Structures are given as structure tokens and as C-alpha cells.
Image (cartoon, rainbow, N blue to C red):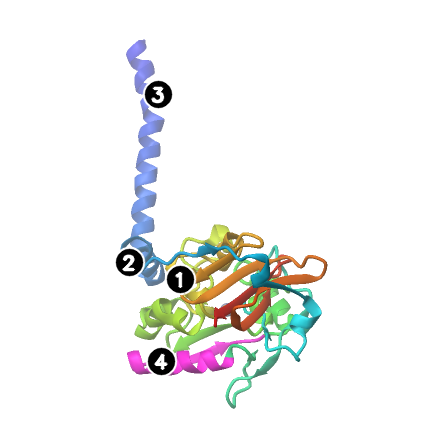
């Protein structure tokens, strides 16, 4: 009787092991045969070392800081540039003020982009051409809420709902190389070059491999997002998403990196604290109730 019971218990375990083994085999076969994007993401995540870069916190004394009202900071009379480069957009943080984005045409095309993106995108496209010999084309930039609504209705499993898409800001764009679009973009030298070097021009791969639990969107090697310098470098080298980066910046702390100072602050009495030693200051809302100040040490 005892022996029979043991045999009876072992059987489901054997079946489970067999099923798990078969599923792994099928998944591996599918990935190796059809998903070059996953293969690239896997190799990059586990076998490609990136230089490390760490933010250090800075101590300023009271006399080194000036508290400036937000309206004054955002007025055109100051030499502070108001941007939206660090505006976080996802299903939790939707766009509720479309007037923030200053859209202009890219070169002589009908593609609309945020004005802060244009120069760095020009440089990115020139640089990728010089380094790979491949010409990268733009598939999509700004979309209206109506465009996003119909894209979402067509494919709710993949597309972001209305007001949760970065395409409604002009800060993000989809790229392709002749006949190689979407997940095939990473098969090209240009796709790989942008993956590893886009940060040099202020761009990140917004939806990296194995980060769907953070971004809500699976790996999209073709979708790049402008965040500016030095943020793109910090995000790339730490293998972060924009979500992880924004939340890594503790409130009211001043960080220093490569001659830049970065601080994430919530206005207190309508004012933000700006270190007096900063130049080329940019100020971006992050869409979580905070502003991110970026400046260079004079
Ligand atoms: Zn996109």
C-alpha cells in the first residue's frame, strides 16, 4: 500500500516537470528563431557592462542659495530655460496640461516635436549616420489626443491610453531604418548604436527590456524619449527607467555629477531654492508635483 501511494504522488510532479521543460524549450525556440529584440535585450542586460556613474549629494549653506518665486523662474525675463524634458508620462501620471509643450516642425517636415528636442535630434541623426553609415528615419512624433484615442482603440493591448502617451508631448519619437521598423529596428547597426549612444545627445530608450513592471510597456527599442543632459547618461549607465530615475532623486537634495547640479523640489511658499553658483539653468516639472532643477557650476 505504501509503495503504491508514493508512486501515485510522484506522477503529477513528473508531469509538471515535463510540462515546464517543454514550455521552456518552446519559449527558447521562439525567442531564438523569432525574437531578435529579446535576444539583444537579454545579452545587453546580462552580458554587457556599462560604466558606472553615481550622483553625489552636495551641502549648500544658506548664503549659497537663493529662494526664487516660481513665476519669476518661469518668466521669459530670467536666463532660466523652462523645459518639459523630465515630464513623466505613464498610466499613473497622465498629461493634464497640454499647453506645457511647445511644438514646432522638425526641419522642413510635418513632424512636430517639442522645441527643446530639435537640436539634439539633429545631432543624434547626424552622429548615427556617421558612425554606422545607416540613415535613420522618423516614423512618428507628436500625436493629438484624437490620434492616440484611435490608436488605443485599434490595439489596447500595446498602445497607451489617451493622455498616458509620450507621443502627445513631442518629447518622444519612433525611429526606423529602411525596411526595419519597430522590434526589427534593433537588428540594425543604427538601432544598436542609438541604444548604446543615444544618451550622448540626451535621449533614452524609454521602454527597456525587462522593465514592463515599472513602465507598464514592454521592450520598445524603436521608441526614444528626450530627457536632456546629463539625465540621459545617468539613466543609461544605471540601467534605470525614467520612473526609477525621477523617484531616485530625494526631495530638496542637491546632487552633483560631471559639473552639473540637479535638485528635485516641491515649491515651498511658491518658491524654489536655486544655488547661486549655477549657470545654464533648466527647470522642468516632473508631473509628480515636483520640479527638477538642472544647472552647470559656473
Ligand atoms: Zn512610440
Range covered by the magenta-colored residues: 118-142
* Residue at the spot of label 4: 127
Q: Residue at x 56, y 62 (%)?
A: 64
How far apart are the two marked residues, 4 and 2, measured between alpha carbons?
22 Å
Whether residue 160 is visible, yes or no, is no
How far apart are the two marked residues, 3 and 4, measured between alpha carbons?
63 Å
From the top left corner, tell me how far across and down residue 148 is, in percent. 61, 69
* Residue at disc 1, secondary structure: helix
How far apart are the two marked residues, 1 and 4, measured between alpha carbons?
18 Å
* Residue at the spot of label 2: 48
User: Residue lying farthest right?
Assistant: 269
Counting residues from the N terminus, which is met first, the one under dot 1 or under dot 3? 3
Q: Residue at x 31, y 30 (%)?
A: 14
From the top left corner, tell me how far across and down residue 94 is, in percent. 63, 61
User: Residue lying farthest bottom?
Assistant: 108
Q: Badges 1 and 2: C-beta atoms under 8 Å apart?
A: no
Between 152 and 256, the one lying in front of the other is 256
In reply to whether residue 128 is colored magenta, the answer given is yes
Whether residue 186 is visible, yes or no, is yes
Counting residues from the N terminus, which is met first, the one under dot 3 or under dot 2? 3
Counting residues from the N terminus, which is met first, the one under dot 3 or under dot 4? 3
* Residue at the spot of label 3: 9
* Residue at the spot of label 1: 236
Task: Please tell me whether residue 57 is drawn above or below residue 261 in the rendered image.
Answer: above
Mark 4: C-beta under 8 Å from nearest atom of ligand 1: no
* Residue at disc 2, secondary structure: loop
Task: Please tell me whether residue 239 is drawn above or below residue 276 in the rendered image.
Answer: above
Amino acid at each position: 500500500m505504501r509503495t503504491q501511494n508514493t508512486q501515485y504522488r510522484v506522477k503529477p510532479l513528473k508531469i509538471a516537470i515535463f510540462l515546464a521543460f517543454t514550455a521552456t524549450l518552446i519559449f527558447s525556440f521562439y525567442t531564438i528563431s523569432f525574437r531578435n529584440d529579446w535576444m539583444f535585450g537579454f545579452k545587453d542586460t546580462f552580458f554587457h557592462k556599462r560604466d558606472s556613474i553615481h550622483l553625489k549629494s552636495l551641502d549648500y549653506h544658506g548664503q549659497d542659495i537663493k529662494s526664487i518665486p516660481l513665476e519669476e523662474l518661469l518668466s521669459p525675463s530670467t536666463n532660466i530655460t523652462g523645459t518639459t524634458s523630465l515630464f513623466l508620462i505613464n498610466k499613473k501620471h497622465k498629461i493634464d496640461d497640454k499647453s506645457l509643450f511647445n511644438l514646432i516642425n522638425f526641419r522642413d517636415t510635418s513632424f512636430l516635436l517639442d522645441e527643446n528636442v530639435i537640436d539634439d535630434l539633429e545631432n543624434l541623426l547626424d552622429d548615427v549616420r556617421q558612425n554606422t553609415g545607416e540613415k535613420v528615419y522618423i516614423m512618428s512624433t507628436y500625436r493629438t489626443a484624437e490620434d492616440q484615442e484611435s490608436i488605443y482603440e485599434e490595439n489596447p493591448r500595446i498602445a497607451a491610453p489617451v493622455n498616458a502617451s509620450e507621443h502627445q508631448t513631442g518629447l518622444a519619437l519612433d525611429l526606423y531604418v529602411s525596411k526595419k521598423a519597430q522590434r526589427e529596428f534593433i537588428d540594425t547597426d543604427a538601432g544598436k548604436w542609438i541604444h548604446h549612444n543615444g544618451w550622448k545627445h540626451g535621449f533614452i530608450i524609454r521602454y527597456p527590456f525587462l522593465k514592463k513592471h515599472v513602465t507598464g510597456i514592454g521592450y520598445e527599442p524603436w521608441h526614444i524619449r528626450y530627457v536632456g543632459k546629463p539625465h540621459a547618461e545617468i539613466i543609461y549607465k544605471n540601467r534605470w527607467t525614467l520612473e526609477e530615475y525621477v523617484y531616485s532623486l530625494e526631495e530638496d537634495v542637491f546632487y552633483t555629477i560631471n559639473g552639473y547640479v540637479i535638485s528635485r523640489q516641491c515649491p515651498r511658499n511658491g518658491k524654489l531654492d536655486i544655488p547661486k553658483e549655477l549657470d545654464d539653468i533648466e527647470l522642468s516639472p516632473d508631473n509628480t508635483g515636483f520640479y527638477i532643477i538642472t544647472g552647470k557650476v559656473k
